[in-house]
Image (cartoon, rainbow, N blue to C red):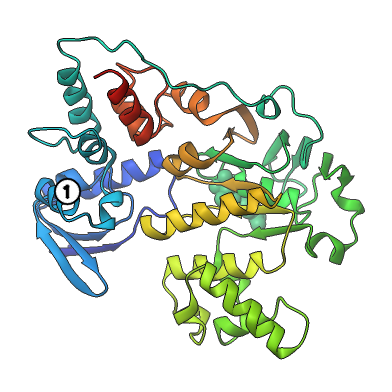
Amino acid sequence: MQPSVLILDEPTSQLDPIAASDFLNTVKKINRELRTTIIITEHRLEDIYYCSDKVVVIEDGKMIAKDEPRKVGDYLKKCGNEMFTAMPTPVQIFYGVGGKGRCPLTVREGAEWLDQVFQDHAPQVTAVDDTPETNLDPDNIKDPAVLVKEAWFRYEKDSPDVLKGVTLQVPKHVLYAIVGGNGTGKSTTLKVISNICKPYRGKVLINGKEVKKYKSGELFLGNLAMLPQDPQSLFAKKSVQEELEEMLTGSKEEKAEKVAEMAELCDITRLLKSHPYDLSGGEQQRAALAKVLLTDPKVLLLDEPTKGIDSFFKQKFADIMMKLKERGVTIIMVSHDVEFCARYADLVSMFFDGGIVTTNTPNRFFSHNSFYTTAANRMSRHVFTNAITNEDVIELCQKNR
Ligand SMILES: Nc1ncnc2c1ncn2[C@@H]1O[C@H](COP(=O)(O)OP(=O)(O)O)[C@@H](O)[C@H]1O
Ligand SMILES: [Mg+2]
């Protein structure tokens, strides 16, 4: 259509990090070479923030900042605005250690800035403690909540195998993250765990019992719940309120009370009367999460739960996950959000070509990966050996003052 203005609304929310970066590079090229004006909304700012001419921050329907990227970061920091936590990693680390001078915006600028910081004194402490707790040693997991053993699956009899001997063991009460490229079989693995897809070879056990031996109602009543990749597929009613009530039994008052409590937790109270299809992507994600949590599962499967969610609710979502873990829930999460996995997961697995190729604790997992890793790790790996979150880098910078 050869437009002169191109408007993109969170275009990378469903893409894996490498595909997202490729996509945004194309957008940049369109802007530079075809001189097309681009207006883009994004939550994942690492790859696009630095090259924007103007950044606009909107809060409660009002524009609170409009400036070039470096100034916006500085402004949000100075006024203590929560949106600062949405800034790209180098910006957060720079201000986190009280950096002076020009703030780095990209991984490369961040790495150069760290070089300057340690120009006269090489760091003495170069690693954060990453010794796994005993139950998290991936080679020695006892009594797992979920066990998948050599599962093979294909969608049609004569189509190629999608799962080629998937094996995974998930310890009880942990957040277990699965990362990997698009189309490698991650969602299919979750469907196999929840017995929606039945493997033609291999086994799936939930709390020691084979998943196919659970009666159909029994599995989804308090044992296991799944938030699918497309949250809309969970909605069939006219309002969010009805969607949530549907999950409950008991008197009208009891239901209303539980719904109100869950709506509060998932930050959807003001949306209860809305039609589920009228919500934004992130709001649908939260409504679907509320619906799934109302079944009070022991094992919770989440397929890309943080897509379309802003940094503010993401923090809240993390708090909910930590609370569920304390209550004994085991969470398996497929995600492209490496920053989130690095910060909150207990174990991370890499999925590639129909199987799991490595599993480790986040610090070990991400610091051994060159591409599939966090911005904090990429900007600091030449000075620190295993820093993967902003906090890790800030901690090590402070220890080496
Ligand atoms: N319902 C389906 N019928 C046929 N093929 C499917 C179906 N769902 C997924 N696939 C195929 O299985 C492969 C793995 O898909 P999926 O598990 O969704 O990957 P991921 O979640 O890792 O992106 C892809 O090649 C996809 O096209
Ligand atoms: Mg998927």
Q: What residue would you read off at disc 1? A: 73
In-image side of 401 versus 173 (left or right)? left
Residue 293: quadrant of the picture? bottom right
With respect to residue 372, does 199 lie above or below?
below
Residue 183 on image: x %, y %: 55, 45
Residue 57 can be seen in this image: yes
Give the SS element for disc 1: helix
Residue at 24% x, 59% y is 40
Q: Is residue 140 left or right of residue 216?
A: left
Residue drawn at x 74%, y 23% is 140
Q: Going 42% across and 60% down the picture, which residue do you hit? A: 313
Q: Quadrant of the N terminus?
A: bottom left
Which quadrant holds residue 13? bottom left
Estimate the x, y position of residue 26 in percent, counting from the top left. 25, 46
Asked if residue 32 lies left or right of residue 240, the reply is: left
Position of 72 with respect to 189 (left or right) is left
Q: Residue furthest bottom?
A: 252
Q: Amino acid at mark 1?
A: Gly
Q: Which of 65/227 is in front? A: 65
Which image quadrant: the C terminus?
A: top left
